[in-house]
């Protein structure tokens, strides 16, 4: 099991922001990533449907690669399915919301924290609840900016159109005097320069992916699952249910490890069984 890969999943390319951190912090670990781009976006879907998709993907990653840990590199799927997947799987399952909330609580000085996320994550209210559970002195301002996901999936990270979408989307937060903003969707760190420009240099941007990768390193040690080989990991395995060329292009722009050569996975292969071993 120590030699097995770590599995990561997202609705699309956003989870690559978490994968990049995992690859940086854990250079001897193998990774396998699945982006469910054919069924993206997850944000507007109801929690039961997102849980079904997450279960299908976890089952695939277990059958395909015998993963030793699952990182749900998607806030929407974490909100909907983390608790269920932790009950159903015997391997450790890590989500991004608790580590992101913890990082925000540690970063804020004035206790006014903004959270931008998909509509599903905002509806779940899990960031607010988790942040307040860790420190009730905070005030949390949550805002759904679902259309930022479309920019990232279209690889539109710098254009005038992207700047205008980000500026308009963040406007409701600008008079809230926040000093910390959680990028509560794994797609959003790809828009970090635009987001920072709009909120200004005094606001600390929190990327839950960084905190999640850190948590994964500790859990591997705790469960004695770390790869002991001392050998640099081979190239990761990548699957997308969507267009392979589009996935590869985005992944090549974002990851250190290139070129990425993703495999296409038809959605039918995920839906033919929902059973998790
Ligand atoms: N990347 C996902 C997240 O972190 C969701 C994007 C979507 O499919 O709506 O929430």
Image: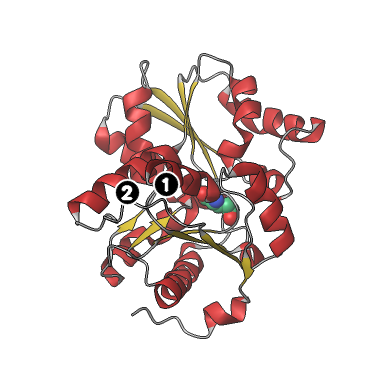
88 over 21 or under it: above or below: below
Query: Residue beneath label 1, please?
Result: 22
Q: Quadrant of residue 242?
A: bottom right
**Residue at (61% x, 41% y) in the render:** 145
Q: CA distance from mark 1 to mark 2?
A: 8 Å
Residue 95 bears which disc, if any?
A: none
**Residue at (62% x, 46% y) in the render:** 146
| Left or right position of 75 against 212 | right
Q: Tag 1's secondary structure? A: helix
- Residue situated in front as seen by the camera: 269 or 163: 269
| Left or right position of 130 against 180 | left
Q: Position of residue 58 (x, y in %)?
A: 42, 69
Q: Quadrant of residue 255?
A: top right
Instruction: Characterize the local packing of mark 2: few (<14), some (14-19) or many (20 or more) Cα atoms within 10 angstroms.
Output: many
Q: Position of residue 210 (x, y in %)?
A: 42, 38
**Residue at (52% x, 44% y) in the render:** 17
Q: Position of residue 128 (x, y in %)?
A: 38, 38
**Residue at (62% x, 56% y) in the render:** 260
Q: Is residue 147 visible?
A: no
- Residue situated in front as seen by the camera: 68 or 175: 68
Is the CB of the residue bearing disc 1 within 8 angstroms of ligand 1?
A: no
Query: Residue beneath label 2, please?
Result: 216
Q: Position of residue 77 (x, y in %)?
A: 46, 58
Q: Do residues under tags 1 and 2 come within 8 Å of each other at their CB atoms?
A: yes
Q: Tag 2's secondary structure? A: helix
222 over 141 or under it: above or below: below
């Amino acid at each position: 099991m120590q030699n097995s890969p770590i599995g990561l999943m997202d609705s699309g390319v956003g989870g690559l922001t978490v994968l990049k951190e995992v690859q940086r912090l854990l250079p001897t670990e193998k990774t396998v990533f699945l982006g469910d781009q054919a069924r993206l976006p997850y944000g507007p879907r109801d929690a039961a449907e997102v849980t079904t998709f997450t279960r299908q993907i976890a089952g695939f990653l277990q059958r395909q690669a015998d993963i030793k840990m699952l990182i749900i590199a998607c806030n929407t799927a974490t909100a909907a399915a983390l608790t269920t997947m932790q009950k159903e799987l015997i391997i450790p399952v890590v989500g991004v919301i608790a580590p992101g909330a913890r990082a925000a609580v540690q970063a804020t000085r004035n206790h006014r924290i903004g959270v931008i996320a998909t509509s599903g994550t905002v509806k779940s209210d899990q960031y607010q609840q988790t942040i307040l559970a860790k420190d009730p002195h905070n005030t949390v301002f949550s805002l759904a900016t679902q259309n930022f996901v479309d920019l990232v999936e279209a690889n539109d990270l710098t254009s005038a159109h992207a700047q205008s979408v980000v500026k308009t989307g963040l406007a409701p937060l600008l008079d809230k005097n926040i000093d910390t903003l959680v990028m509560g969707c794994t797609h959003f760190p790809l828009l970090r320069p635009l987001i920072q420009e709009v909120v200004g240099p005094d606001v600390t941007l929190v990327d839950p992916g960084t905190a999640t990768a850190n948590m994964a390193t500790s859990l591997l040690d705790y469960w004695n699952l770390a790869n002991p080989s001392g050998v640099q990991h081979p190239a990761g395995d990548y699957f997308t249910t969507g267009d392979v060329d589009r996935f590869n292009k985005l992944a090549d722009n974002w990851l250190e490890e290139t070129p990425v050569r993703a495999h296409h996975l038809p959605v039918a292969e995920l839906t033919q069984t929902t059973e998790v071993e």
